[in-house]
Amino acid sequence: MELEHSELLEVPAARVVAEARALVRRVMERAGFAAMDITRVVTATSELARNMVKYAGGGRVRVALLRDEARTAVRVEFADQGPGIASIADAMRDGFSTGGGLGLGLPGAARLVDGFHIDSRPGEGTRVEIRQWKR
Amino acid sequence: VDTPIPILKLGQALLVPIYADLSDEAALTLQERLLYRLQETGARGVVIDITVLDVVDSFLGRVFSDLSRMVSLMDGVTVLVGMRPQVAMTLVELGLELRGLLSALDLEQGLDLVARKLSERDALLPPASRPLGEGLLEAGALAFGGLVAGGGRAPGSGHGA
């Protein structure tokens, strides 16, 4: 699969959660994604970017369009150098929160998109990737 | 959003047309401004128009839901209008419950709903007994008196007579 387009955003503060949404929306609109899919991915982006701000004090959001012969996908990566997640299984459970929130962030975001992948090591940070195919 | 969201008074309601994506900070500022405007204007309904929003995430959903409960403590009613189908689907998939929030399809129905809710609520209380505190006391006394004496008492005629 070929990388067609990629944009990077540093997310240092809560204000930038909205900018991450705007970035992903812009890339997906240009690529002609349907409104429903834009809403799903942008909402997931919002949850994940806010998680990064809340737990890691910031991080990076990278948006890319991927294309093979038949299909286009958008991929959004969230990488931080925060404390990491001790138990991914716990973090993926609805209602689990260590940040005083509703605990919907990770599992909620995962339900909204076609592909969800998370890597985390305590002390090293967390990397989350989501992917949505263009229909 | 750099320009503050307008808060417009329309009859007994405050109308809030959200015209662009809101940052977390802007959402919290709006929540606070609305409560102060309620107090200043004596309005009792809040109608939030989210027709242009294609994303309501868990944070904004919670701000709306909290606002609705705060407004209700101030004797008001909050209605969310114009939710797009994809926003409704996304909120449910996220697992977010917008506790306490009423919604209506569009602005017109939202304003109707506010009027209806307020008149339903007022019908439960003797009209002269507003504000809230006195109204509730008197309604309580009525029910109590009715139970004890089998009805026929004037409002506020007291307990245990």
Image (tube, grey):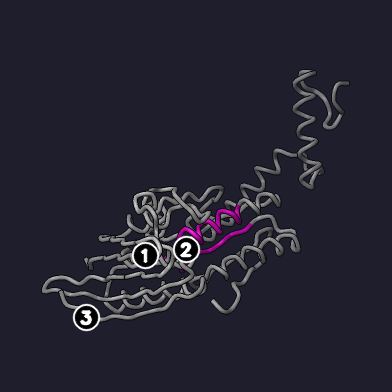
Q: Quadrant of residue A20?
A: bottom left
Res. B152 visible in picture: yes
Q: Please check the rendered image and state whether residue B54 is part of the magenta-colored stretch, yes or no.
A: yes
Q: Please state the horizontal and vertical placement of residue A118, each as a whole percent of the image.
A: 31, 61
Callout 2: SS: helix
Res. B54 visible in picture: no
Question: Callout 2: residue from which chain?
Answer: A
Residue at 14% over, 73% down: A68
- Pick the front one: A101 or A31: A101
- Pick the front one: A53 or A24: A53
Pointer 3 local density, CA inside 10 Å: few below 14, some 14–19, many at least 20: few
Q: Quadrant of residue B53?
A: bottom left
Residue at 42% over, 73% down: A59
Q: The N terminus of chain B lies in which quarter of the figure?
A: bottom right
Q: Please check the rendered image and state whether residue B41 is part of the magenta-colored stretch, yes or no.
A: no
**Span of residues in magenta:** B46-68
Earlier along the polypeptide chain: callout 1 or callout 2? 2
Earlier along the polypeptide chain: callout 1 or callout 3? 3
Residue at 45% over, 62% down: B56
Q: Residue furthest front?
A: A123
Give the residue at mark 3: A4
Distance in Å between CA atoms under marks 1 and 3: 25 Å
Give the residue at mark 1: A126
Q: Please state the horizontal and vertical placement of residue B161, each as a whole percent of the image.
A: 88, 21
Give the residue at mark 2: A55
Q: Are marks 2 and 3 in contact (CB under 8 Å)?
A: no
Q: Are marks 1 and 2 in contact (CB under 8 Å)?
A: yes
Q: Residue furthest left?
A: A69
Left or right placement of residue A79 versus residue B131 in this view: left
Tag 2: amino acid: Tyr
Earlier along the polypeptide chain: callout 2 or callout 3? 3
